[in-house]
Image (cartoon, rainbow, N blue to C red):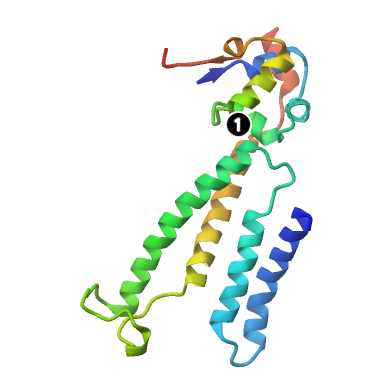
Amino acid sequence: MTNRLRELRAARLWSQGDLAEALGVSRQTVNAIETGKYDPSLPLAFRIARLFKRPIEAIFQDDER
Amino acid sequence: MKSSAVKGLGVLIVAAAPVLHFLVPGAFWNRTSAALAAGLMMIFFSKEAIHDERVQALKLTAVNAAFSVSFTLTLIVNWFLNRDFDITRDFDGATGTWRSISAFDLIIVTMTIALALFHYWRLRDGGSADHSHRVAAEVR
């Protein structure tokens, strides 16, 4: 799974800490998602999508397709 | 009780138990190991400051790996204590023919490995400093 979280966050000039606070997770978790070490749960993916006002598939891409 | 208080109490127990063990003449190891096991479990199972899904996932993975390793270590240590895997030997401690490390010792090893793995993985998650502005410039 790849994602555009880093790119979307940076476009808004948010730090990882800002994004983490908005999502209610830790900065380490945001970094783990951005670097592809961790795929978020569906509820967290929906929160991310709502925050960036984009559909989930515009943020997360399945590499296996 | 707040999770930070539970964690603090766990740290206190883990720090005090070995000191008391060596200060009190004739202290029984099983009592010390019970305290150590309880303290380590309080540290590991208490909630983190931000207890999100990644923390839960890492803790579960850490305890899975730790239990496998500690159980294997127990088998190895028990082999050295008994020097064989003779299945005809009695497990009854009364006969004194078969020895094993205690459940408390197993928990101590498991929790120590789990805590080490969890904090190592969490440290790796942290990555380097947050370069949001540099990344923003790259995106533009």
Q: Quadrant of residue B127?
A: top right
Q: Can you give x and y, in whole percent of width and height, for residue B45 in the image?
A: 63, 54
Taking depth in this image into account, of B135 and B61 the one nearest to the observer is B61
Taking depth in this image into account, of B108 and A47 the one nearest to the observer is A47
Residue at 72% in and 58% down: B7
Q: What element carries label 1?
A: helix
Q: Can you give x and y, in whole percent of width and height, for residue B101 in the image?
A: 43, 75
Mark 1 belongs to which amino acid?
Ala
- Residue at label 1? A32
Q: In which quarter of the image is residue B35?
A: bottom right
Quadrant position of the C terminus of chain B in the picture: top right
Chain under callout 1: A
**B82 over B51 or under it: above or below:** below
Crowding at dot 1, Cα within 10 Å, few <14 / some 14-19 / many 20+, comes out as: many
Q: Can you give x and y, in whole percent of width and height, for residue A13 in the image?
A: 78, 17
**A5 over B35 or under it: above or below:** above
**B53 over B67 or under it: above or below:** above
